């Protein structure tokens, strides 16, 4: 029969029974405690109604999330199947096929962990100054590792902001991709943002050691003079690079007299 909590003097028992009753309102389980008057009955009905709405909402949200994950997983599986089929039908070399699949898998995993700017529609409605602030936050930590751009960050913030906004582009490289070759006409300074690189000077058969990595740079002379790269830069792993364009950098540096003395 029904056992009112008031019949028990032990505080621990009364607390445990109250907790048990509360939990059963959200589950099909039962408890040997029930309403004994109209007020308690109304209270029980209200709690049950709230529990029903809460549980339904949680189940609905969970089901929707699981369905979305399954759809995403199914779409990814389909895309990789199509890629493999395309490579096979066109008789792509096995080594190149392996490189393509490994790079595609790496980029797909990275895309799942980070939100691509193209997916954020509201970024398009931001004001130009806010967009410039975002670009500066994204690129200035990498550029400021170089003493010259560290100076710009400290004393000429507006110039650095212009550089980050209008002169920087991003380049993603798969393993064994070539960044540049020796004697190519240089058009950009390279800032290595992530990954590993082999750099081999012209006329040498082995790359320099240790390998180049994040927070290093190459081709600085490109910004100040006509230049040709002096070696081969090849990605030793999936890597990311920031490119500072020669012409775009020159236009930015012409905007303010304070920068002219660097020429």
Image (cartoon, rainbow, N blue to C red):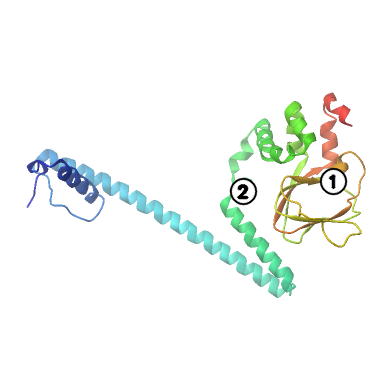
Quarter occupied by residue 260: top right
Q: Residue furthest top?
A: 257
- Count of picture labels: 2
Which residue occupies 40% across, 54% down?
Answer: 62
Mark whose residue sits in front, 1 or 2: 1
The answer to whether 141 is drawn above or below residue 58 in the figure is above
Q: Can you give x and y, in whole percent of width and height, for residue 131 in the image? A: 66, 35
Circle number at residue 116: 2
- Nearest the viewer among 205 and 194 is 205
Q: Secondary structure at mark 2?
A: loop
Which residue occupies 44% across, 54% down?
Answer: 65
Between the C-alphas of marks 1 and 2, the distance is 29 Å
Residue neighbourhood size for the residue with mark 1, other residues' Cα within 10 Å, grouped as few (<14), some (14–19), many (≥20)? some
Which residue occupies 73% across, 37% down?
Answer: 144
Quarter occupied by residue 161: top right
Q: Can you give x and y, in whole percent of width and height, for residue 99 in the image? A: 70, 66
Q: Secondary structure at mark 1?
A: loop
Name the residue that disc number 1 marks.
219
Q: Quadrant of the C terminus?
A: top right
Residue neighbourhood size for the residue with mark 2, other residues' Cα within 10 Å, grouped as few (<14), some (14–19), many (≥20)? few
**Mark with earlier residue (1, 2):** 2
């Amino acid at each position: 029969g029904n056992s009112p909590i008031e019949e028990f003097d032990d505080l621990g028992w009364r607390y445990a029974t109250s907790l048990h009753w509360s939990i059963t309102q959200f589950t099909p389980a039962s408890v040997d405690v029930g309403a004994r008057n109209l007020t308690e009955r109304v209270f029980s009905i209200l709690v049950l109604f709230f529990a029903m709405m809460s549980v339904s909402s949680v189940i609905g949200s969970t089901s929707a999330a699981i369905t979305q994950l399954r759809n995403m997983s199914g779409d990814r599986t389909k895309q990789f199947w199509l890629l493999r089929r395309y490579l096979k039908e066109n008789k792509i070399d096995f080594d190149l096929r392996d490189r393509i699949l490994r790079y595609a898998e790496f980029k797909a995993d990275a895309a799942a962990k980070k939100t691509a700017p193209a997916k954020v529609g509201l970024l398009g409605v931001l004001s130009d100054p806010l967009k410039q602030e975002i670009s500066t936050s994204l690129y200035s930590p990498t550029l400021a590792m170089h003493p010259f751009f560290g100076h710009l960050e400290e004393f000429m913030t507006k110039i650095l902001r212009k550089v980050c906004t209008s002169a920087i582009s991003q380049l993603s490289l798969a393993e064994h991709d070539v960044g540049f070759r020796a004697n190519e006409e240089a058009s950009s300074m390279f800032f290595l943002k992530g990954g590993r690189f082999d750099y081999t000077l012209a006329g040498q058969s082995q790359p320099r050691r240790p390998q180049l990595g994040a927070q290093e740079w190459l081709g600085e002379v490109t910004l100040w003079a006509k230049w040709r790269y002096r070696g081969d830069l090849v990605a030793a792993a999936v890597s990311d690079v920031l490119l500072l364009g020669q012409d775009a950098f020159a236009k930015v540096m012409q905007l303010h007299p304070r920068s002219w003395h660097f020429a």
